[in-house]
């Protein structure tokens, strides 16, 4: 009957509008430039110095925020692509000491969060956004200096293991050269054991040491653990100031957690004596010709105990990044062809450098980077500040990055200086 046509026409007219609904635009505190094939927008602003970011098994975001806030629970409306909106958000955990690390067990039921001194666990319900049964699981991690972040990771390949990173006590932390200090290390803990009774950080199994401030950790699809390390500030060699372009920031490989037969398991990566070259041209004397990018060498003046040969017996980085760009996170795509590195940027370089998100290409057949360890072009920028001269105060500063649920090619990134979360499309 024709009397129903106007009603049907009206309903059909509404369908394209419903399908085309878009999230409200949030103007960024500082605009970003994207490489071809990538795009992005601010998902949320007004956070409290956001650092860690993860997804739970229900597709909700959890963040740690340093400015006395704690942990936030964020639900989303997903319209596809980067057209993602915040549906709701609330304070999940109120604790002013929480400062960076956050991780969930693969079943989504146990949440770990860190402060400078402590790792806690909670029973977690992602559907209701609630926690219960708080307990201390790792303790006694206090350091001096500025390296206060404690990064956490539960590897998918070893779901009963919690990895915990601890940085150095200052720029050059001489005691960190002794494994027993448990500084500048990544240690592995049995989740079953620490849930039974809290342990000191020194009780963990050493996955890697001699790592100055390895804030960023990630797992590749094979179960291999990778980290990005922040090199020393104000570096000299034989009295010459070489700090503006040395040392490199390191991409290090630590093997698969439960494979103790791998020689890299528990390896020493050189700190506090050894660092890898970024710019050989400024090195004194013949070193400018004999040392290549990525080769470890001694800081200061060599001695019989601390020589370049000794440094080159330590584990070397798989790749180098420009000095003082401050990588704080690394995450792999699902097929192992790329890793994305968040460069927070540093004060110890002129002109300022970092403040960007970059892509490193990997060979999934070998699990290793495509570029050689001597490369200076392995990190390809995908999102950056147009004017780094305005940094660090007037630019976004990437901290942590995470892939969203499903095979969508979307990344979510925290920027602590601008109190934002960005959603980025095209990440494959």
Image (cartoon, helix red, strand yellow):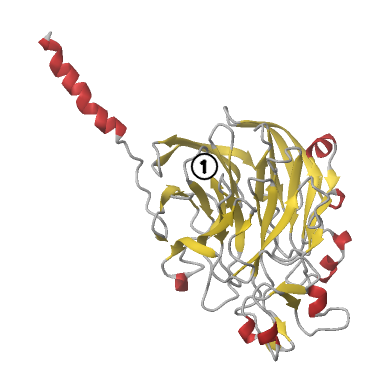
Q: Is residue 49 left or right of residue 122?
A: left
Q: Residue furthest front?
A: 365
Quadrant of the image containing the N terminus: top left
For image coordinates 69% across by 80% down, the residue present is 291
State the image quarter where residue 287 is shown.
bottom right
Q: Nearer the viewer, residue 428 or 268?
A: 428
Q: Is residue 30 left or right of residue 357?
A: left
For image coordinates 66% across by 31% down, the residue present is 107
Q: Secondary structure at mark 1?
A: loop
Q: Residue furthest top?
A: 1
Give x and y (percent) for residue 309. Answer: 81, 78
Q: Residue furthest left?
A: 2
Give x and y (percent) for residue 67. Answer: 59, 53
Q: Nearer the viewer, residue 275 or 78?
A: 275
- How would you rate the neighbour count of disc 1 (Cα within 10 Å): few for under 14, some for 14-19, many for 20 or more? some
For image coordinates 61% across by 56% down, the residue present is 329
Give x and y (percent) for residue 267. Answer: 80, 60
Note whether residue 96 is visible.
no
Q: Nearer the viewer, residue 266 or 49?
A: 266
For image coordinates 81% across by 84% down, the residue present is 302
State the image quarter where residue 390 is shown.
bottom left
Q: Is residue 97 left or right of residue 51?
A: right
Residue under label 1: 404
Give x and y (percent) for residue 8. Answer: 19, 18
Note whether residue 300 is visible.
yes
State the image quarter where residue 103 is shown.
top right
Q: Is residue 308 left or right of residue 375?
A: right
The tally of labels here is 1
């Amino acid at each position: 009957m024709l009397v129903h046509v106007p009603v049907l026409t009206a309903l059909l007219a509404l369908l394209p509008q419903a399908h085309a609904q878009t999230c409200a635009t949030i103007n960024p505190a500082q605009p970003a430039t994207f490489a071809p094939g990538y795009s992005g927008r601010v998902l949320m602003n007004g956070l409290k110095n956001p650092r860690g970011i993860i997804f739970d098994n229900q597709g909700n975001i959890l963040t740690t925020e340093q400015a006395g806030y704690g942990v936030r629970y964020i639900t989303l409306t997903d319209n596809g692509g980067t057209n993602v909106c915040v549906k709701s958000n609330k304070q999940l955990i109120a604790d002013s000491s929480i400062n960076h690390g956050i991780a969930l067990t693969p079943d989504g039921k146990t949440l770990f969060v860190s402060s400078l001194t402590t790792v806690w666990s909670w029973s977690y319900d992602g559907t209701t956004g609630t926690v219960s049964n708080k307990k201390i699981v790792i303790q006694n991690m206090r350091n001096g200096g500025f390296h206060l972040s404690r990064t956490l990771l539960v590897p998918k390949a070893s779901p009963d293991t919690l990895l915990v990173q601890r940085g150095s006590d200052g720029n050059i932390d001489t005691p960190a050269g002794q494994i027993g200090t448990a500084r500048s290390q990544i240690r592995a803990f049995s989740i079953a054991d620490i849930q039974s009774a809290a342990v000191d950080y020194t009780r963990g199994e050493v996955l890697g040491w001699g790592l100055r401030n390895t804030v960023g950790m990630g797992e590749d699809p094979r179960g291999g653990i990778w980290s990005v390390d922040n090199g020393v500030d104000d570096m000299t060699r034989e009295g010459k100031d070489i700090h503006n372009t040395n040392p490199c920031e390191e991409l290090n490989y630590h093997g698969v957690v439960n494979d103790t037969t791998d020689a890299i398991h528990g390896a020493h990566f050189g700190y506090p004596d050894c660092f890898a070259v970024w710019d050989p041209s400024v090195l004194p004397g013949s070193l400018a010709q004999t040392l290549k990018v990525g080769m470890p060498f001694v800081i200061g003046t060599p001695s019989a105990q601390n020589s370049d040969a000794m440094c080159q017996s330590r584990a070397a980085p798989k790749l180098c990044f420009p000095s003082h760009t401050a990588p704080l996170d690394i995450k792999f795509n699902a097929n192992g062809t790329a890793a994305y590195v968040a460069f927070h940027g540093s004060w110890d370089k002129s002109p300022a450098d970092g403040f960007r998100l970059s892509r490193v290409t990997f060979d999934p057949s070998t699990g290793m980077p495509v570029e050689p360890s001597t490369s200076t072009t392995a990190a390809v920028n995908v999102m950056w500040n147009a004017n780094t001269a305005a940094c660090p105060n007037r630019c976004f500063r990437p901290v942590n990055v995470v892939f969203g649920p499903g095979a969508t090619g979307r990344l979510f990134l925290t920027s602590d200086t601008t109190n934002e979360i960005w959603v980025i499309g095209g990440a494959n």
